[in-house]
Image: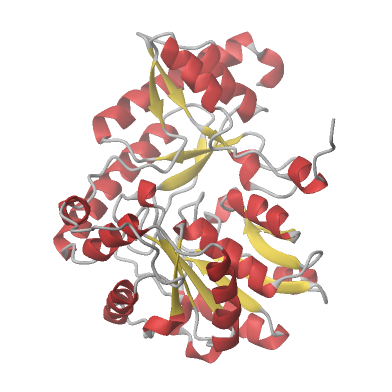
Amino acid sequence: MPALSQKGQDMPQSPIRKLAPFAEAAEARGTQIYQLNIGQPDIKTPQGALDAVKNANIDILSYSHSAGFLSYREKLAAHYTKQGIELEPNEIIVSTGGSEALLFAMGSITDPGDEVIIPEPFYANYNGFATSSGVNVVPVFSAMEDDFALPPIADFEKLITSKTKAIIICNPGNPTGYLYSHEEIKQLAELVLKHDLFLIADEVYREFVYDGLAHHSILKERSIDNNAIMIDSVSKRFSMCGARIGCLASRNKEFMATAMKFAQARLSPPTLAQIASEAALDTPQSYFDQVIEEYVDRRDTLVAGLKDIPGVKVSVPKGAFYCIAELPIKDAEDFARWLLEDFEKDGKTVMVAPAAGFYSTPGSGLNQVRIAYVLKKEDLVEAIHLLKEALASYKEQHADNA
């Protein structure tokens, strides 16, 4: 039998999706699952985006420009300008989801064996994107006790080598919900200028910021115009995960010209999804006001419920719709699988994402889970109740893992 690639063997499984077979088996048994494992909002997609596809007058479903429709990029640029981010349409490449934008960025700035520094825990697929690009992730630890704030700059500097090409952040953070302050962004800007590095910011949750705080994009730091690369997506902003439309933005002309070669190699982003995404930009602010109010209520419900479970610790997110919870057990992955295989109450159970996959350091996050508060409040309350009972039952049955 022909041998598979080492890269393929090294590619990590998604901690978010690898338990899917156990969930499918549970559902086949008739079990209802409260899915807190994946960032799939139950918020309705803006009707205007759906109508734009439904009413599209298309005779030939053709390619678009490799950078995406010019009309969409012009509208995106105007959208960013309203947020204080000045961009030209030629400084934006539309991608097939934020995932492809990250792959384009890594492919454009790194060679095999190069390094990127990422505060951990981080979005699990960064590990996969790095493996695909032959890049080594160098983690810098952020502490739950600090709600996963930016680690000290000195901790970053200790890790910078001749192989370091970029620092990657997610702001607000997935899986932590942490929102980097303006001061923290300025510190990173000074660091990448000092060491001549790229700063890649995954800003797909930009609109989801709470408690009167404000998001500060790296593209507002004009001193790093040649260092800053922004990743964005419609998936969460407009509850359009299935559209698979994101974008890559930078004022660095050489970088954008290089990224365009990757965009040309995959031909173009999907046409119908671009039509929906362009229409979604007309969504009124009232939509986001209602969504943010809903997420704040869900966050508060979740955090209060988790704190009421004996032995559970939880960070308080300031943005996005995730939090990391530390459980009073040793192996959260075993617990997550047990929830789907062996636990149910009144025909119901809960699905969570083991947090170890959101770390790069072996042995980290083993007793943590990521929880996405993307379900309506009543479902969250029920899910928390089930989680509380499940933990008590699991600890009784698995004393060696408690």
Q: Is residue 103 left or right of residue 317?
A: right
Give how far across and how far down residue 19 sits, in percent.
56, 27
Name the quadrant containing residue 160.
bottom right
Q: Is residue 132 left or right of residue 5?
A: left
Give how far across and how far down residue 396 sits, in percent.
59, 10
Name the quadrant containing residue 210.
bottom left
Visible in this render: residue 253? Answer: yes
Give how far across and how far down residue 272 sits, in percent.
31, 56
Name the quadrant containing residue 148.
bottom right
Query: Relative to 360, is 308 above or below?
Result: above
Residue at x 15% of width, y 54% of height: 55
Residue at x 34% of width, y 67% of height: 213
Visible in this render: residue 208? Answer: no
Residue at x 29% of width, y 55% of height: 238
Residue at x 72% of width, y 84% of height: 195
Q: 270 or 20, which lies in front?
A: 270
